[in-house]
Image (spheres, rainbow, N blue to C red):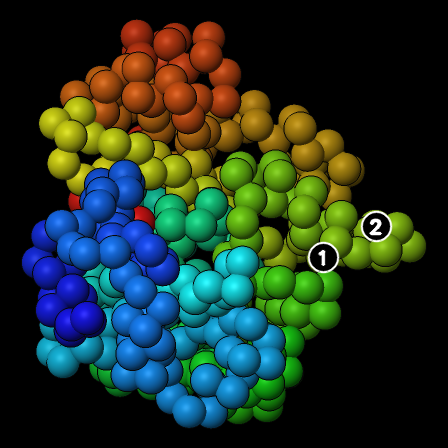
Amino acid sequence: MNISALIEGAAQVKASDIHLMEECAPYFRLDGELTPVKHPPLTHEDMLVVVNELVPERLREVLEKRRGVDLGFKHKDVVRLRLIVYYERQRIRMVFRLIPLTIPTLEQLNLPPVVQTIATFNRGMVLVTGPTGSGKSTTLSAVIHYINSHDRVSITTIEDPIEFVHTNMMGMVTQREVGEDVLDFNSGVIQALRQDPDVILVGEMRDTDTIRTAIKASETGHYVLSTLHTTNAIQTMERVIGTFPQAEQDLVREQLASNLRASITQTLVRRAEGKGRAAALEVLVVTGTVSKLISENRLRDIYGVMQGGEEGMMTCDQALAKLVREKIIAEEEGLQYARDEFAYKRYIKGVSSSNDRGGIIAGFGG
């Protein structure tokens, strides 16, 4: 099969992902939905050809040993891709994530103004959360791009794999890839702390050691950004605290109260006209009030503070309702993602804080 033509075709129609599996035609993910491509079913030999063409020999050995591998690469001057190769019932499967070569700006993504404010922080921790494919990496890349273009700082990223590639602007950017430049996320952060960084991006906090080290980095005056697969701000804090043994949780709670600066949770929703997706951004900014509630283990009370809209905060339901009021998404579509149906419908009618702001993200592939 001609994998080059397939990749270029996916980029041309703005697909976010390509799925390949034996005995099936390829699939593109378009506007959030899987769409079959007019192509003969792929054979085992087809899949082996793609593996041999795209996966370096060293990683092919890893694939055979661990039955799965992921890597990033650039295809000509068309697109970057993140490729995951794995086995399913002893058959090869592949998923490609398409990543634009040009890093989108905060303005191009139409992110709410509070995100730019968050990008100006110089210490503490910011977490961007959401399910797989919700655009977390795109948002973080836009934030890093903003910092890089506005501040004379040293930025270190630890990613698995590297997706968007940054070049030095006002800042200096070092990008390290897990498995290539560093053993794992935790050791990457530990090493980064010795490299005079101002900003550290941890691609994903997958384990207790990485979370502990990232919190320590934020405590020592660094600006730390990372991601989690959580679906709202409260769950994010519960996840971080709950990752630790019971004996450590009070300490971690105090560390979050002192060092967490913001949490952004993204939800992608199909646009009303059917092309592209919009993002509803739930935003928590850790004010003095929020910090006190975290310290007192009153996490559920934070939701009420967010509803008030102070400093650009918003709940997911408020962001969804704003998209409906602006006719960006259909009310029925937003309802599928609403946390509280009654509150969501009330916000659509305009019963909401005057500071309520949603986010419309036009540049996300997924």
Residue 347 is situated, as x and y percent measured from the top left of the image, at 36, 14
Residue 351 is situated, as x and y percent measured from the top left of the image, at 36, 10
Q: 133 or 43, which lies in front?
A: 43
Mark 1 residue crowding within 10 angstroms, few (<14) / some (14–19) / many (20+): some
Question: Disc 2 or 1, which lies upstream in sequence?
Answer: 2
Residue that appears at 34% across and 35% down: 280
Number of numbered discs: 2
Residue that appears at 73% across and 32% down: 298
Q: Quadrant of residue 350?
A: top left
Find disc 2 in the rendering and name its residue: 250
Q: 119 or 325, which lies in front?
A: 325
Is residue 179 found left or right of 266 in the rendered image? right
Is residue 310 found left or right of 302 in the rendered image? left
Where 62 sits versus 281, above or below?
Answer: below
Residue that appears at 39% across and 38% down: 267
Q: Quadrant of residue 238?
A: top right
Q: CA distance from mark 2 to mark 1?
A: 9 Å
- The quarter of the image holding the N terminus is bottom left
Find disc 1 in the rendering and name its residue: 255
- Asked whether residue 173 is in view, the answer is no
Amino acid, disc 2? Asp
Q: 68 or 14, which lies in front?
A: 68
Where 296 sits versus 23, above or below?
Answer: above
Mark 1: secondary structure: helix
Mark 2: secondary structure: helix
Residue 279 is situated, as x and y percent measured from the top left of the image, at 30, 38
Mark 2 residue crowding within 10 angstroms, few (<14) / some (14–19) / many (20+): some
